[in-house]
Amino acid sequence: MALQIYNTMTRSKEQFVPQESGKVKMYVCGPTVYGYMHIGNARPIIVFDMVRNYLEQLGNEVRYVTNFTDVDDKLIRKAEEMNTSVAEVAEIFINAYREDLEGLGVKPATLNPRVTESMELIIGFIKELEEKGYAYESGGDVYYRTSKFEEYGKLSRQNLDELQFGIRVEVDSRKEKPEDFVLWKAAKPGEVYWQSPWGNGRPGWHIECSAMAREFLGDTMDIHGGGQDLQFPHHECECAQTEALTGKPLSNYWMHNGFINIGDEKMSKSLGNGWLVKDIRGQFKAGTIRYFMLSTHYRNPLNFSVDSMTSAEKSVERISLAESNVKHRLELAAEGAQGEVSLEINDKLSAIVANFHARMQDDFNTPDAITAMFDWVSLANHTLANSEAAPADFAALLQAFGEMNAVLRLTPEHEEEEIASEEVEQLIAERVEARKNKNWSRSDEIRDELGRLGILLEDTPQGMRWRRK
């Protein structure tokens, strides 16, 4: 098997071959930190966390860089609203972002460069573009001369003469051509600024990623990722800036995830139909959110609803229950003879794991990879029903599950020990006594009462167990 990735640049699947064997350089555009993360932001975060996990499982060392845009017009307006500084706004929402990452089961990036800490890099990058004739100053602003870069539009497959400019940004008479984009913006009175050869100001949006990616990943990275909405103009402009300067491809593979819709409408702040991740985390665990995101192929659109999240929650509960029961059986036999893995279990597990990898290597086909995990659930439940199954069978089951779950992370790798409250302990003890006395109606009443407290009971051949919902 060989990993195939759909490359947006070529519009085709290609075998992934990193520039340096065993090492992957990967850049994913990060947040503009002026507000809380919404569910649309969470999709690329989870998708590219999954991509990173799988690349690492294949034996690669992944240098994963995602930036923080901690100064721009939105932060300036937010600082005015909050009667505070741009730096304080950025710190508030960077901290909130990191809390959301943890709540989504996402590993931290290798590096999170900030725009405000990269100003010398950015100014130096613009100066080089100016020296090569790709940038020009006008009225204190500096613009990129798109007409000089003949391949402008190659990523988004848009013809320069046919592009509809003036939709996202106003036409500026100071530009040589309407399609030219800003690299450096002159500061308005009272705004935060940095000194530069063109006067006080701050960088434009696109130049930030080009400068930081080049500094931390070199002239060419292996993978550049982000949402579909970033293909144009952001990633297109990054290509033009970097490749004009270096004469090399900015990235060998471009990956873009699809949009999230709310009620079959594209999610947008203007429609007021967005959901904040911090609110969703209050209702659903990380594994549920990840399952929802990964149960649809990353390039396809995804429709968000509470019903779809509830369905995802039930699916994760099935997986989690099987994993928990296998762990329990193995723990009970920890001190006894382990035996050997049966040929049937070994063969079936090998087929399940091989299928999982085959699906993942086909452009990260996580929906079918999840199906492989449910094949594991079926095998686990069948083995649990076999009273003669050897402990080694359950150990093999857990090893296979761990290999798949390390990529998708649908259940926690390390569960904290559950501690019951005094009320819960009393009810559990009362139910045990009721069952001894064959008082089935009272036993059922207690089960329902515990359910209302968020406690699930499991009657197993090895005794009663409980866990939180």
Image (cartoon, rainbow, N blue to C red):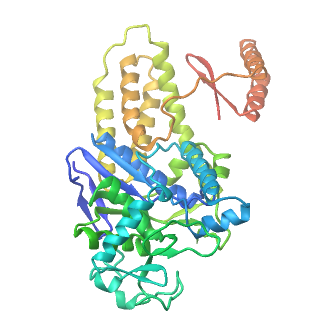
Quadrant location of the C terminus?
top right
Residues 256 and 101: in front is 101
Above or below, 361 relative to 181: above
Q: Residue at x 47, y 89 (%)?
A: 174
Residues 188 and 374: in front is 188
Where's residue 428, x and y in %? 73, 19
Above or below, 463 relative to 411: above
Q: Residue at x 36, y 13 (%)?
A: 338
Above or below, 110 relative to 223: above
Q: Residue at x 42, y 75 (%)?
A: 232
Q: Residue at x 59, y 23 (%)?
A: 417
Residues 322 and 331: in front is 331
Where's residue 427, x and y in %? 77, 20
Where's residue 18, x and y in %? 23, 52
Q: Residue 109: in sight, yes or no?
A: yes
Count of marks overlaid on the render: 0
Locate residue 279 relative to residue 258 in the image: left or right.
Answer: right
